[in-house]
Amino acid sequence: MQRWNVAITGFGAIGRTVASLLLQRQAHYAQRYGADVRLTAVCGSRAGLYVPEGLPGPSGPAREALQAGLTGAEFIEQTNAHVLIDAGPTDFETGGAAYVYIRSALSRGLNAIAISKGALIFDLPGLRALAAANGVALKFSGATAAALPTIDLLEHNLAGCRVFRVEGIFTATTNYVLSQMMDGVALPDAVAQAQQLGMAEPDPRFDLEGWDTACKTTLIANAMFDANITLSKVERQGIDQITRGDVDGWKAAGVVPKLIGEIVLGEHGVSAAVALRTYPEDHPFAQVGAKMKAISVRTDAMGEIIAICRTSPLATAAAALKDFEHILMKR
Amino acid sequence: MQRWNVAITGFGAIGRTVASLLLQRQAHYAQRYGADVRLTAVCGSRAGLYVPEGLPGPSGPAREALQAGLTGAEFIEQTNAHVLIDAGPTDFETGGAAYVYIRSALSRGLNAIAISKGALIFDLPGLRALAAANGVALKFSGATAAALPTIDLLEHNLAGCRVFRVEGIFTATTNYVLSQMMDGVALPDAVAQAQQLGMAEPDPRFDLEGWDTACKTTLIANAMFDANITLSKVERQGIDQITRGDVDGWKAAGVVPKLIGEIVLGEHGVSAAVALRTYPEDHPFAQVGAKMKAISVRTDAMGEIIAICRTSPLATAAAALKDFEHILMKR
């Protein structure tokens, strides 16, 4: 069996979920791919752990087991992994620690899987060039709507089709807040509920102003269609200005509002936007309730295809491990 | 560039659509995969054509260009292809000509892509074993709901997840007839409409009695979950006995009927069934209108995922070429 050492950087809730899910699937990897997968290293921002023969399962190491100082650029150098999964915090300004980890991994011939969006938004072209130069994979399903198939839908299930338009409910938080508002809840209360459920950040503006949707839309457009779009140039609406009057109007009209990320592939190139749209009640998007996401892709030969799924931290971890499994399939 | 010669057996409407779509995509295959793809041979039941350097595009050969006699088992021997795409008629009793073509292709080291279900229902285990023994691929998206991602959804987008249940609207004909009946059309008239649209066969019983859904469900269960299910043992309902009273009852209850193929993976193994189910109007399946198909998959880590798409002869051809592209991706 081929040995696959996996390192995880960022060891918060998502990183720990990835660790335990990976450990639970070791027998599956052995059976399906003949792959001897070991979780050999994890680190957070101040401490880490390296166990050359692999950590025991099924739930990953306790935080207390981490050793102070084994973190940062040296972590990748010292831990001899084949695959890096980064689950660290997002930094859109500089790419943050994730950018350092991913660059270091790709440069050393590790495959890299990103979950947070910061490093990718900061420098996707640079990271992709580095991956190509080193003959390794850079994957990021976790950053492009997680369990919802987006990049894999476009490149695998629709292989060969010309895509005209991609439209998606990519941000669960805004979809939750909009759904609650349509049920009569006021905006601040709906946001507070989302925060209590762990769906919205303490500062919810990133989601509410449409930035999260803009990030995912930009990443999909640039990764799949070489769109070369800059986040700041994406036309963008949010849901932070919605009033009770808007809600009443939509209800009277029998339509359902959704915050949409949209990519249009036209004669003059690729454009991306974030827009607040309304859908009639018999449209599949109208049924995409709170805590769900959806994508619609219009193509030449296969017509329109729609995918809908739920969102959860476990699903995000599973999306990163889907990326890992696609790497195993190719080797 | 690596040369890929493609042969198509069965040259009716679907076979011709596959031919022209393949020819239109030659530049795409070259650019994306470095593959020099040629359509070198086609045949129907009485005549065929072999052009070693490849047929010109963009629309494939006229029927008149085919030479009498170049067909049957010798067609595969004489035409030096790397990939066979079979688009011939379905024969559930013996596998028919498709079975001969696919066996002959796999034995000689060709990858095979099946569109019709007959040969697969007749002997999927035998064909898969033959493919494995010869180190080639056997693919059949066209036989398992075409443009709707079914096998590829399960093995690619949900890689790593444990599947509990698969539920699908796999037959467009029955979905069309049911939708029309809910709009007040009588069963015989709805069937006649479907026949006029080319969606139903002259003998519509195969669809109406649930056999088509049973075939697709069985193929998915056996291909993905090694279920070893025999078609005749699948519990099966049809829509041929539905009355006006049933329709009135569903309308009064605010539910929508769908003919469903279902696979359940339980503690005691895998079971498959075809059942008439009703869904509340806010369920995504209730919105899957005439000419559409859908699948729902429930998993451990990713929860429920739903895909919905339209159906057309072009989409069926595109599904077979999606299979072809997945073969190119792996080489």
Image (cartoon, coloured by chain):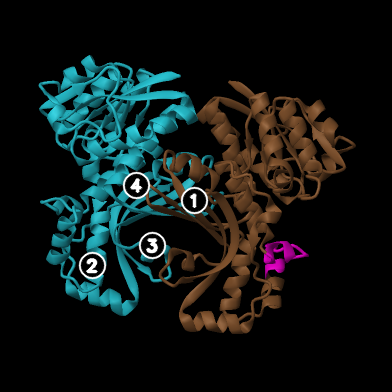
Chain colours: A brown, B cyan
Q: Residues within 10 Å of mark 3 (few under 14, many from 20)?
A: many
Q: Can residue A196 be seen from the camera position used here? A: yes
Residue behind mark 1: A266
Q: Amino acid at mark 3?
A: Phe
The segment highlighted magenta reads A194-209
Q: How far is disc 4 from disc 1 in space, using C-alphas?
A: 46 Å
Circle 4 chain: B
Q: Are marks 4 and 1 on the same chain?
A: no
Q: Which of the 4 image quadrants contains residue A55?
A: top right
Q: Amino acid at mark 4?
A: Ser
State the image coordinates of residue B71 (x, y, percent, origin top left): 15, 23
Q: How far is disc 4 from disc 3 in space, using C-alphas?
A: 21 Å
Q: How far is disc 2 from disc 4 in space, using C-alphas?
A: 31 Å
Identify the element where label 1 is drawn. Answer: strand
Residue at horizontal 10 percent and vertical 21 percent from the top = B69
Identify the element where label 4 is drawn. Answer: strand
Location of the C terminus of chain A (image quadrant)? top right
Q: Which of pointers 4 and 3 lies earlier in the amino acid sequence?
A: 4
Residue at horizontal 47 percent and vertical 81 percent from the top = A253
- Which label sits on residue B271? 4
Residue at horizontal 17 percent and vertical 64 percent from the top = B190
Residue mark closest to the camera, 4 vs 1: 1
Residue behind mark 2: B180
The verdict on residue A200 being magenta is yes
Residue mark closest to the camera, 2 vs 4: 2
